[in-house]
Image (spheres, helix red, strand yellow):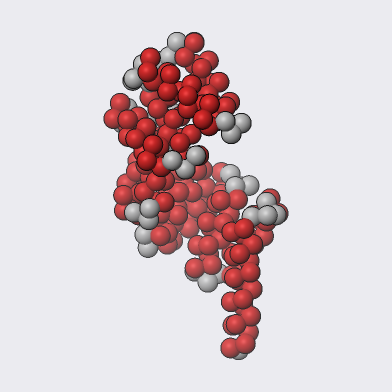
Amino acid sequence: MADTPHSQNVLDRLEKAEQLKLAGKHEEAITMLEELVLEDPSNVSALEEIADNELSLERHDRAQVAALQAITLDPASYTGHYILGFLRSHESKWAEAMISLKEANHLKANNPEILRCLGWVLFQSGQKPQGIVTLERSLNLDSENTLTLCDLGVAYLEMKNFPKARALFLRALDLDPGNPRARECVSAIERIEMQLRRVV
């Protein structure tokens, strides 16, 4: 979130909106944040939080509008750049996603979520070694993130490093036994290895 001076009342309301978001009450958080923006259209923090909540609700168009507004008001809004990069990667627009995510990473270095998305985009763009290194950095910063474990696992799976991929997916399943992506990928590795044994 960009650092901007706010009155204590505004800070308290931003904090309340943050608590609502963490409790999964995204609609309530958005209503509160939109009131703040109506009172002060230049409130970048509120716009960033609106974008984040809209992203959680998978309302990508609305998330994009709020993120763009935040960046227009404050080009140093790493949250705005991150959300735009995430949205572009979701659309498989890797080149556009990389520009936004590199800017977010420049503004906020060593943020595990930014690094996770950037690593995935680098890998999907054909910069596979850089992608894996970046995903590894993200995992070092947040070792129990199942999204990162699975992204890195898929990267190693594509590189045909089955032992490394399996270890990452099994770690994800230890943390989240019902994780469908990790389960599916472990099954895929087992099928591939079975086929390879048959060939041998």
Q: Residue furthest left?
A: 72
User: Is 30 positioned to the left or the right of 196 in the image?
Assistant: left
Q: Is 27 situated above or below 103?
A: above
Residue 110 visible: no
Residue 200: percent from the left, percent from the top?
Answer: 60, 89
In the image, residue 60 lies at what x, y percent? 41, 42
Number of numbered discs visible in the structure rendering: 0
Among the 4 quarters of the image, the one containing residue 66: top left
Q: x%, y% of residue 144?
A: 63, 47
Q: Is residue 105 toward the left or the right of residue 164 in the image?
A: left
In the displayed structure, 189 sits above or below 75; it is below
Which residue lies at the image location 37% right of the left edge and 18% below the top edge?
38
* Residue name at image x 29 percent, y 30 percent: 72
Residue pictured at 63% horizontal, 80% vertical = 194
Residue toward you, 105 or 16:
16
Q: Quick one: 98 or 37, which is closer to the camera?
A: 37
| Image position of 101 with respect to 158: above or below | above
Image position, residue 108 (x, y; %): 43, 36
Q: Quadrant of residue 161?
A: bottom right
Would you say 42 lies left or right of 184 here? left
Residue 59: in sight, yes or no?
yes
Q: Looking at the rendering, in which quadrant would you find the N terminus?
A: top left
